[in-house]
């Protein structure tokens, strides 16, 4: 794994809970198809901000990995 890939995978999407992009992508690949699914599988969006900072990036990831 090169440095850029490592940085991308470990980028924090949910700052409140410290959840990384890789964790969210893995959840999507394992069947999370909505924000609620991602929240249930990862806890993303359930922190202090209630998703105000992470909902948009998660929606983008859901579009980037549709139906996986």
Image: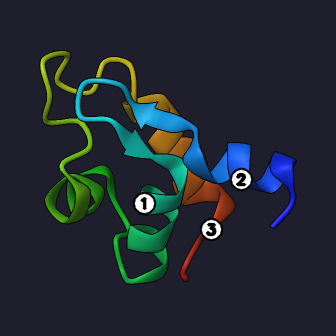
Q: Nearer the viewer, mark 1 or mark 3?
A: 1
Secondary structure of residue under mark 2: helix
Eye-nearest disc, 2 or 3: 2
Q: Residue at x 49, y 44 (%)?
A: 59
Q: Which mark is residue 23?
A: 1
> Which residue in the protein does label 3 denote?
65
- Could you tell which of marks 2 and 3 lies nearer the N-terminus? 2
User: Residue 38's quadrant in the figure?
Assistant: bottom left
Which residue is labeled 2 in the image? 6
Residue 65 drawn at (x, y percent) = 62, 68
**What is the C-alpha distance between the residues marked 2 and 3?**
19 Å
Label 3: which secondary element: loop
The residue sitting at 23% across, 36% down in the picture is 45
Name the spot of residue 62 as percent of width and height, x first. 52, 57
Q: CA distance from mark 1 to mark 3?
A: 13 Å
The answer to whether marks 2 and 3 mark residues whose Cβ atoms lie closer than 8 Å is no
Left or right of residue 16, residue 3 in this image: right
Colouring method of the image: rainbow
């Amino acid at each position: 794994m090169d440095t850029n890939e490592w940085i991308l995978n470990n980028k924090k999407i949910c700052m409140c809970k410290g959840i990384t992009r890789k964790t969210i992508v893995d959840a999507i690949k394992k069947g999370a198809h909505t924000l609620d699914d991602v929240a249930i599988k990862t806890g993303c969006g359930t922190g202090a901000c209630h998703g105000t900072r992470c909902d948009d990036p998660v929606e983008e990831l859901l579009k980037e990995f549709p139906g996986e």
